[in-house]
Structures are given as C-alpha cells and as structure tokens.
Image (tube, rainbow, N blue to C red):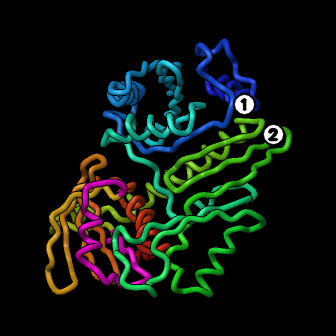
Amino acid sequence: MNRQELSLHLSAAMQGEAPADVFSGRIRGGAVKSRLVEAHAPEPSSEGIEQLLRETSENLGVAVADVGENLWVLRSDKDIFFVDALNPRFWLIHSLASAGVFSSFVKRGLLSDPRIDSAWLPAAQLDELEGEREWMKSSFIGDELEPAQGEDDGARRWSFRVEGQAPQELLEVVRDRLPRYARATSLTAVGSRVRVHGVGEARVVADYRGGFISTGDSFDVVAGVLYRGLDRYEAFIRQLEDVYRLRTIAATNDTGLILDGEIAIVRFPMAIRNMRGFIAGLFSCKEPFRLWAVPREVSEGEWEANAVDLHVGHTLRLDITPGMLRVYLNEHTCGNTLARLIANLQHRYHAQTALAPAA
C-alpha cells in the first residue's frame, strides 16, 4: 500500500463506503481520526522508526507491518491504525476506530513511551490552520496551578463552543471588555471547512494537542491540511531549538568559549499570587507538563529548578518569578518541551501567556 492507496481507502470510508475486502474489514465508514506526534526513534531511519513502533505497541497486543515508504500499519483484533512517518520526527497517525479507542491507543500505546510526545499547538499555531472557520471552542482549567482567591477572581473553569461567522471574535470581545475573564479565553479547538477546486471538500476539527477529526468526500483535501500543518509545526519547533538552545562554541581566536543561544522568557499577563501552588503544579511529573524537579526558593517569591523533561529525559533549568518564567534549554533539549509549556500555561494559567521575542 502506498499513500495514494491509503488516501483512496480513507476517502471511501469518509463517504460511508468502507472497503470490506481491505484489512479484513477493519476500515469502517465514518470520520477519520488523526494525531500529530513528535517522536525520537533510536535513529531517523525506517529501521529505527519500526523499532520504536514495535516497542510501543507491544503492550497493546497489536501487529506492526511495514507497507513501504515509511508507512506502517498497526492491527488489533478489531481496529487498524496507520502511521505515516514520512517525516521521521513528526508522525501522523490515522484511524477509523471510534474516538475512544483511538484516544486510548494514542495515550496508552504511543504516548506512554517517553520518546513520543503530543504536538502542542499554542494559540497562534492553532489559529494558523487553514480553512473557512465554522466554529471554535475555548476551555480553561485555572484552578490546577492557582486556586481561586475569592468570588471576584474571574473564571476558573469554563468550556464553550461558538458557531457562526468569525467565531473567534467572541474571545477578542471578552478579552477587551471583560478583563476579569480574559485569562480564561484560551483557544482549544477549531472547526473549519476546506474546499479544493476539482478535488473535493472536507470539514476538519483540530485541537491544541495535535488531534484532528475529518469528514467530507476527499481525504486528499484532509491530507493537504495535515501535511501543511505538520510543516508549520516542525518549523516552529526547530526555530525554538535554533534560537533557545544554549551551547558553548570555541572562540575563533582560541582564547576560550562563547555561550551561544537565547534564554526563553515566558511572560505572565497577570502576576502569580500563589507561588507555592503554582510551583507544585508545574513540577508534579504528571501530564500535561511532564516536568520533574526539586525546586528551591532562592529569595522571597523567586524560585529556581533544575528540571528533567519526562519526554526523552533531557534537562533544562527554570527560574520562576511572579511575572515571568525564564527557561534555559540545554544543547539537546527538545523544542517540544517549550511548546508544551507555553500551550499548557495558556490553558491552565492565563490564555495570553506568551514567549517574549528573542533579543
């Protein structure tokens, strides 16, 4: 099977015409679920990718088959999952399994391995996804990092969906006119209609964790959206690594070493009021931040932590004050670490948390 054949099968399934003679009927009609993940295989080759897939799939009892061109098929008793690793670091996973089955496969199978992480799309990345916007969703969980301080503390938890023309304008209205609620206006998911003349059309739902659900009459249209989204995300992650990884290089006159790279500064639009609660939530080792550290208070209201990112296990240092977070990426620390941090601070502390421009 090549990618064109896969696209034909998925297009038929999207139209309710599941090919019963392919993969013993495991391709069923319905919406295509997709996920963008970031992976660190033992080596960036077909052999390395297959080794990682076999190791992560072992606990799920699924069979792994290489069908060529860095395209793999993972089969369970009832369902099938396609892994498109044309880009050896950023993979696309597709399936027609139910949403619950697909979510469990990704979470218990792929993401349980520290070498694989979700793609984390901060609001600006999510908003760049193409298509005519039909709806948007905002959700916020603010009491995990900082419990409510009183009745006038604004929204702590909320979730709503807005349909219609230019739905994101509602978030802008809330930010401008209701400052108490501005912190909760995180962009969580968008639904868009995409049309390509002479090819077809599709509706694509995308969320900030790199998840997609697609319906319509052409998976070719969907594939274009996903590949272009993957390219933008890869460029974003590699730019973070190029700019913010700190490394030493030899001086040209052999007189010593030069420190190269920038410190990543994440600014908080609202000062942290409960530093101990914030620190505890940030370094809990759990999803979604996946950071382990023994932070220490170096002066009143100022903390530092030498942390380990539980994705891949790279190290980084963080300085936390009420108004900002300074992140020192080591030479090999994954840029996805910084993307995950920003995206989840937008959904758990303040929607307008942002990375300050590099000097």
Identity of the amino acid at label 1? Ser
Question: Which of the 4 image quarters holds residue 329?
Answer: bottom left
For the C terminus, the quadrant is: bottom left
Identity of the amino acid at label 2? Gly
Q: Secondary structure at mark 1?
A: helix
Tag 1 and tag 2, C-beta contact below 8 Å: yes
The stretch of residues the image draws in magenta is 262-288
As drawn, 309 above or below 83: below
* Crowding at mark 2 (Cα within 10 Å: few <14, some 14-19, many 20+): some
Q: Which residue is mark 2?
A: 200
Residue 70 is labelled as none
- Distance of label 1 from label 2 (alpha carbons): 10 Å
Q: Could you tell me residue 59's position as x and y percent?
A: 33, 27
Q: Is residue 304 magenta?
A: no
Residue 112 appearing in the image = yes
Q: Nearer the viewer, residue 339 or 245?
A: 339
As drawn, 217 above or below 260: above
Q: Which residue is mark 1?
A: 11
Q: Nearer the viewer, residue 58 or 146?
A: 146
For the N terminus, the quadrant is: top right
Q: Residue at x 21, y 61 (%)?
A: 307
Q: Secondary structure at mark 2?
A: strand
Q: Earlier in the sequence, mark 1 or mark 2?
A: 1
Answer with left or right where residue 337 lies relative to residue 343: left
Answer with left or right where residue 192 lies relative to residue 255: right
Q: Could you tell me residue 231's position as x and y percent?
A: 56, 49
Answer with left or right where residue 44 lies relative to residue 2: left
Residue 51 appearing in the image = no
Q: Residue at x 63, y 36 (%)?
A: 32
As drawn, 166 above or below 289: below
